[in-house]
C-alpha cells in the first residue's frame, strides 16, 4: 500500500489524517508547529522534520493548510515540498485556496515531474471526523482514478469537478451559495422578529417547506440558543464572498445579491463580529432593526 | 359533522376541497366562474349560487382565492359572504393575501358576530393534492382547536403562528426566504457556468452539503431540462418580494439582499419572463453574462 | 387680473402665496388650521372658510398640501373644492403627490368642467422665498400658456414636462437622483473618514471636479457642522425612494443602486433618524463603520 | 531652476509635461515607446534613454504612467529609476495607482535617500491641457512646499490631502463618488425614459436644481447625442469601484450602494461595453428595460 504524507494537522486536517490511518494507509505527518503532531507520534506514526522530507519519503502528499500563503510556505524554500518530490509523487491539494494559487501550485509540482490533484473539501469538523466530507476533485481522469480510494477514505461523495482548478472553483461556487443563504436566512428571521413572529414557529415553517435545508436546521438551533461560537466564522465567509465577487467581476457577470450579502458580512465584521460564527451576520441586521431574534 | 363551504376552486383550491370531501365533510362549493364547479357537481356536491348562499348554509367557510381584490369581491356586495354569515359561522381565510387585507377581512367578519381564522398555506399543487401543505394558522387558540381537524384534512403540519394576521405575515416570511434562495441559486449557477463548471457536478456538490434543499433539487432538475413552465411564476414571486420589502420598510428594517433579489426578479420580468417559472430569474443573469447554465 | 385661490400655507406654500401677492394677483387663501392664515389676514388678504368657497370665488386654484391624503381631503367632501368649481376654473396642483393621485385629481376636476395643471416644484424653502423653485409643469399646451405667468411668479425655470401626470413623474425622477446622490455622498465621506482623510480636503476635491454639485456644497457644510436639523428629512426622502422603486417595478426596470439607497434610508430611519435631515443617512453608515465624519 | 524628469507621455502626461515646459522648467522626458517623445525632441527637449538616466540627471522626477504594474516597471530593474536616484532627488508620483503601490514606491525611493510626493490628479485631458487638474497631494509639508510651484504649473487647485498614501486614497474617494453618480444618473434617466419623460426636460430639471453637476451636463450632452466614445471608459471606472469596495471591506465599512454600482458596471462590461465611455453603464439598464434614453 502507498505511503501518504500529510501536511497540516489543524481542526480539519487531523481527523482527515486519522481516517487515512484507520483505512490502513502507511502515514507520515508534518505540521508547522509541534503540538498537533503529538497524538500522531504517540500512536506510532512517523513525524517528518519538513515538507521536503515528506516529499522524499511519501508516494502521495496531501496538503491541508489555511490559505494561499500557507500553501506557498509548504511548497517553497529550501525545506519545501518542491525540493523533496521527484517524479514518483502525487500531490493532492485539499486546502481551501484560490483557483490562481491552485494553478500555480500545479505548475510547480508538475515541473518536478510529479502529478497534481486539486481536491478541496466542503464540510466542517463533524463530517471530517465521520469521513463524510464532500470532496471536490479536479484533475486528469487517470490520476483521479489512482487516488480515488484515498479520497474516499476521507470523504463521500467524491465529486469529479473537471480539471485542476475546477475543485477550487467549485469550492467557491458552494461557499457563494452558503454565504447568500446564511445572509438570506438572517434577513428572513429579522423580518419575522420585527413583526413578533415566534422563532420556533418560523423554524417549523421553514423545515416543512421546499426551503428546508440542513444549514437552516443547524444554524437555526444555534441562533435559538444565541450561541455564536465560531464553526465557520464571519470573516472566513466574508473572505469567500469577496473572492467570489472578484472572480465574477473578472469573468463578466453581475451578482447583485451576492454583492449585497458581502456588504452585510462586511458590516457584521466592521461591528466586531468577525471572529464569531457566520450566523453573527444576523447581529448586524438586528442592530439596525433594534430587535433580537428569539427573544 | 360540520358543513363546509369552499370558495375558490383553482389549481390549489380544488384539491384542497377534494381532500375535505375525502375526509367525510359535508361540502358546498362556490367559484366565480362555472367550469371548476362541474367536477364537484358531477360528484353530487352542492354548488352554491353566491358566497352569500354559502355563508347562509355552511358552518365553516373557507376562502381560497387569488389575491386581496378577489377576497374583497367574495366578502363584499349584495351577494357577498358578509351578508350571509350570522354568528354561527367560522371563516377560514386560506388565500395568500396581505396582512392588511387579512386584518380588514377579520374585522368585517367579526362585525357579523362570526369567527375568523387566518390560515394561508405554503406549498404547491403537489402537496395540495397529497394533503401535505404547510398550514400557517393564526387566530385564537380555542378557535384554532375547533378547526384543527379541518385544517389537518388539507395540510400537515399545521403550524400555529400567533393571532390573526400572523398567518399572512408568516407566509410572507417564508416567501421572502424562497425568493432570496431562488435568486441566490441562480447567481451561483451562473457563476459556475461562466467558469465552465458542469451543472451536474454543481448539483451533486449542493446536494451533498449543508446547503442542500428540496428547492434546489426540484428547481435544479427543471433548470437542467431547461423547463421553465410556471409552477410558481416569476411575477408572483416578484410580487411577494416587493410586498416583503414594503413591510420591512414600514416596520423599520434594512433588507439589502432581499432588495437586490427583488430587483433581479424585476429585471427578469422586464425582460419578458414574468409568466415563466420563478427559476427564470436565471435568464436575466444568463443574458448579462452571455452564458447558458447546463450547456 | 385673475383671482387666485391658494390652499396650503405651509413652509413652502406660504412664501409661494406671498410671491403671487407681490406679483399683483388678487389672492384668496385657505389653510386647514388657522394659524398660518393670520399673516395673510393681517395683510388684508381674504381668508376662505373652505376649499369649496375658494373654488366658488377664484378663477385659478392652487393646491400645495402635504401628500395624497391631504390632497384628497381638499378635493372631496361637502366643503371640498370639487363642490365649488364649475367650469370657469383652472386648478394648478403643486403638491408633491404620486402620479396616480395626480391623474385621479385631474379626472375629478375635469368632470366639473374645469381645467387641470400638474405642477409640482423642486426646491426647498429658500428658493420658495426667492421665487426660484423649479416648476415641473404637465398639462395641455394652451392651458399651460394661460397659467405661465402665474407659475413664473413662483418659480424659474418653468419646465414643460409633458401632459398631466408628467409633472409628478418628473418630481419622482429628480428625487430619485437626489436620494441616490445623498446616499452616495454619505458612502464616499464614510469611506474617506475611515481612512482618516480630512473632511475639508475631501470637500475641496469634490468642489474642484466634475462631481461638484450644489447639493454637496450645501449638505457638506451642514455635515461639517454636524447640523442635522431637518430641511428635507430622511423619512420624506425615504418615502420618495420607496415610491420610485415601486413605479420602476411597475413599469419594468431594474434599479439596483436606488434599491440599495432605499435600504440605507430605511436603516437610518429604523435607527431613529427619520425626522433628521436627509444627510442623517450618513449616521447609519458611520454607526456600522465606527467612525464620525468631520472628527 | 530645477531640472524636471518626466516619465510617461500619454494622453494625460504629455500636456502636463508641456505645461511644465511653458512654465520655464528645464525638462527631460522618457517614455517606454518612442512615438510620444518625438514632439518633445522636435522642440529641443532632451529625451532620456531610461528612467535610470532620468534619475541621474533630474532634480525632480515625475511619474505619470498607467497603473501599479507600469509604475513598478519604471522603478525597478537595472535601468530603473531607483538605480539612478541618489539622495538629491524628489520623486513626484502622479499616476493613478493604489495606496499600497504608493506606499511601496515611497519606501523604495526613500531607501535611496530621496524624497517622495504622492500626487495623483483628478480630471481628464481637457483640464490637463489647461493646467486645471485637481492635484491630490500627499506628503510632508516641507516637501510639498518645495514642489508646490511645480504642481501648480500642472493643476489648480493643489489640495493637501495628508501624508504619502493620502493622495491615492483621495483619488479613490473621488472616483467612488464619480462611479456612484454616473450609475445613479443612468438609473434616473432610464426611470424617466421608461415613463416617456423627455430627455431634454429631464436635463433642464437636473440643471435647475440642487442635483446639478458638471458631470451630468457633460455626460448628459453625450448621452443625448448617443456618443459613447471613451473619455473615461467603463472598465476603468469599474476597476476603481472594485478597488474602492476592496479597501472598504479591508477597513471595516459597508458600502451597499457602491457595491450595487460596481455590479452595474460589471454588467455593462460583461455585455461588451467595457471600452466605451463610462456613460455606457446606461446601456445595461436600457437593455433590461427595453428602452433607449433620448428616443
Image: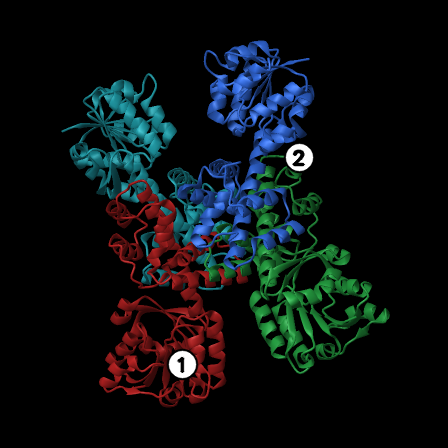
Chain colours: A red, B cyan, C blue, D green
On the rendered structure, is D76 left or right of A89?
right
Q: Residue A76: x and y, percent?
A: 46, 83
- Find residue B75 and report its image quarter: top left
Q: Which mark is residue B268?
A: none
For label 1, the SS is: strand
Give the residue number, with chain letter if any, for mark 1: A91
Vertically, is C61 above or below C135? above
- Dot 2 falls on which chain? D
Nearest to the observer: residue C100 or residue D259: D259
- Quarter holding the N terminus of chain D is bottom right
Q: Residue D171: x and y, percent?
A: 61, 59
- Quarter holding the C terminus of chain D is top right
Nearest to the observer: residue D153 or residue A256: D153
On the rendered structure, is C60 left or right of C75?
right
Q: Nearer the viewer, mark 2 or mark 1?
A: 2
Q: Is mark 2 in CB contact (under 8 Å) with mark 1?
A: no
- For disc 2, the neighbor class at 10 Å (few under 14, some 14 to 19, many from 20) is some
The span from disc 2 to disc 1 (Cα, nearest Å) is 66 Å
Q: Are marks 2 and 1 on the same chain?
A: no
Q: Residue C256: x and y, percent?
A: 51, 47
Outermost residue, left side: B1
Vertically, is A29 above or below C19? below
Nearest to the observer: residue C109 or residue B216: C109
On the rendered structure, is A40 left or right of C101?
left
- For disc 1, the neighbor class at 10 Å (few under 14, some 14 to 19, many from 20) is many
Q: Which mark is residue D201?
A: 2
Q: Residue A151: x and y, percent?
A: 33, 75
Residue placed at 35% from the left, 59% from the top?
A278
Amino acid at each position: 500500500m502507498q505511503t501518504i504524507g500529510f501536511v497540516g494537522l489543524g481542526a480539519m486536517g487531523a481527523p482527515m489524517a486519522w481516517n487515512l490511518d484507520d483505512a490502513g494507509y502507511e502515514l507520515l505527518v508534518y505540521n508547522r508547529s509541534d503540538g498537533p503532531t503529538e497524538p500522531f507520534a504517540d500512536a506510532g506514526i512517523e513525524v517528518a522534520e519538513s515538507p521536503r522530507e515528506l516529499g522524499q519519503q511519501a508516494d502521495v502528499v496531501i496538503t491541508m493548510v489555511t490559505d494561499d500563503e500557507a500553501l506557498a510556505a509548504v511548497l517553497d524554500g529550501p525545506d519545501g515540498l518542491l525540493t523533496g518530490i521527484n517524479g514518483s509523487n502525487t500531490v493532492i491539494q485539499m486546502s481551501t485556496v484560490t483557483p490562481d494559487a491552485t494553478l500555480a501550485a500545479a505548475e510547480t509540482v508538475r515541473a518536478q515531474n510529479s502529478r497534481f490533484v486539486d481536491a478541496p473539501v466542503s464540510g466542517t469538523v463533524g463530517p471530517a471526523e465521520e469521513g463524510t466530507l464532500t470532496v471536490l476533485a479536479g484533475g486528469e481522469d487517470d490520476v483521479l482514478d489512482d487516488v480515488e480510494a484515498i479520497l474516499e477514505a476521507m470523504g463521500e461523495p467524491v465529486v469529479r469537478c473537471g480539471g485542476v482548478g475546477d475543485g477550487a472553483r467549485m469550492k467557491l461556487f458552494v461557499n457563494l451559495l452558503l454565504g447568500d443563504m446564511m445572509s438570506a436566512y438572517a434577513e428572513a428571521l429579522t423580518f419575522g422578529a420585527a413583526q413578533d413572529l415566534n422563532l420556533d414557529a418560523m423554524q417549523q415553517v421553514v423545515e416543512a417547506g421546499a426551503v428546508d435545508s440542513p444549514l437552516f436546521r443547524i444554524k437555526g438551533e444555534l441562533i435559538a440558543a444565541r450561541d455564536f461560537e465560531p464553526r465557520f466564522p464571519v470573516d472566513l465567509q466574508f473572505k469567500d464572498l469577496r473572492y467570489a465577487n472578484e472572480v465574477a467581476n473578472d469573468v463578466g457577470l453581475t451578482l447583485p445579491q451576492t454583492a449585497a450579502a458581502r456588504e452585510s458580512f462586511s458590516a457584521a465584521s466592521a461591528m466586531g463580529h468577525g471572529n464569531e460564527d457566520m450566523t453573527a451576520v444576523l447581529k448586524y441586521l438586528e442592530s439596525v432593526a433594534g430587535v433580537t431574534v428569539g427573544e
